[in-house]
Each structure stands twice: as structure tokens, then as C-alpha cells.
Amino acid sequence: MTETKVRQQYDNIAATYDQRWSHYVGSTLSFLQAWADISPTATVLDVACGTGEFERLLLVDNPQQKIVGVDISEKMLAIAREKCQNYPQVSFYVAPASKLPFADQSFDAIVCASSFHYFDDPHAALLEMKRVLKPNGCVVILDWCKDYLLCRICDWVLPIFDPAYKQCYTQAEFHSLLTSAGYQISRATRVRFGVVWGLMIATASVELGE
């Protein structure tokens, strides 16, 4: 099962993750923060939050921000909890994206960064995010984009070296996943980070009547 492999992999690299991926994480999460433009009064859910770097960024700008992070790696979450230990309104839970342990309509904003390509069941994850999203809330997802050559190469090669990897999507495929789960896309683009990484981002809300 991919979820078990992902958990094991990230438990193994948790201690060195921030150092190893500092440039990528810093660049992509800063972009996500600027794009999402989250209200200081919003209650935020970070799906697959890893070591809590996005939480740290939000708290720099707004130390009172209410944030909940979920991840399937307990060791990644241990680092996240340590980073945010002085912020009692920030909490973390071990949970997969496809089974969020929260009541319906709990969050104003939901973010998910560089994780979608690991999801066993992206449709189930999107439905869960929709379930816990408040009316008039938004979901912002940033992930690798298969429209870029390197990501197509990763899609061919990574399964050989990374058994936890599932797949990445073209922008059209990603948008189709969102709309099939009942979302309306309000804003989207593709973006490069240096010469290596090609990503896509979309902001979506729940369609009226869903």
C-alpha cells in the first residue's frame, strides 16, 4: 500500500528533511503563502504538512493564526510540533488526506503542497477536503506538473527508485480531478522554480448546491 510506504519513507528522512530540501521547500511554500493570501482570521488546514514549515511561515506574519496540520508521518509531525510549540492555537494530527478526523465545515482555508503525487486515492482526498471546508472557503493545492519535461521524466523513473511515488498529473488532468470532485476553480497557473522544478497551483471552492 502506497500510504504505508510513504509513511516509512518520511519517517526515515524526517531528521534531515528540512536541511536536504531547504531551497525547494522555502521557494515553493513562500509562493504558496503569497498565492493563497490567507486571512489572518481564517482557520487553516494544512494537508500533508510535513515538518510544519508552512505553519512557521504563516505564524511569522500572523502569530495568532489558527492552524491544524495533518500528515501520516509521526516523525515529521514531531518536528512540526517542536517548531510550533509556543503557539497553542496550532495543532497536528496523524491522519491521511483521505480520512480527515474533523467535523464537516471546520476550516476556512485548506492547503496542500507537493504531496498530491503520493496520494493513493486523490478523488477521496479531494472529497474529504470538500467535506471539512466551510461554505465560502477555499482549497489551494500546489504540486508537480506533468506538462513539464522533468516531471514527465520523474513519472517514468521515480517508481523505480521511490516505491512510495504514485503519479503526477498534467494541469488538465488535475483540473479534471477537481471538477469531478465538485470544485469550481477560481484561479490557476503553472510555475517554474529554477531550471528543475515545474509545478502547478489551483485555488478552488465548492460549487453551489454541492
Image (spheres, helix red, strand yellow):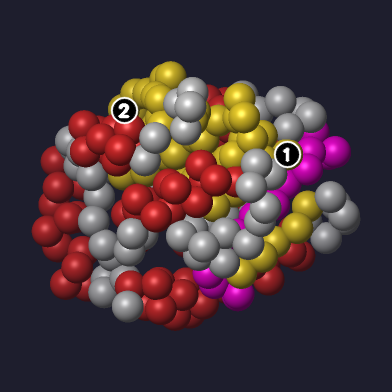
Q: Nearer the viewer, mark 1 or mark 2?
A: 1
Badge 1 element: strand
Residue 116 pos. (x, y %): 37, 51
Residue 152 pos. (x, y %): 14, 47
Under mark 1, the amino acid is Thr
> 124 or 80: nearer the eye?
124
Magenta residue check for 126: no
Number of marks in the rendered image: 2
84 on left or right of 26: right
Mark carried by residue 43: 1
Under mark 2, the amino acid is Arg
Instruction: Reply above or below: 41 against 59.
Output: above
Residue 155 location, quadrant:
bottom left
Residue 3: in sight, yes or no? yes
Residue shown at 32% from the left, 78% from the top: 1
Magenta residue check for 73: yes
Residue 70 pos. (x, y %): 60, 59
Q: CA distance from mark 1 to mark 2?
A: 27 Å
Q: Which residues are magenta?
A: 62-75
Residue shown at 41% from the left, 32% from the top: 183
Mark 1 crowdedness (10 Å alpha carbons): few <14, some 14-19, many ≥20: many
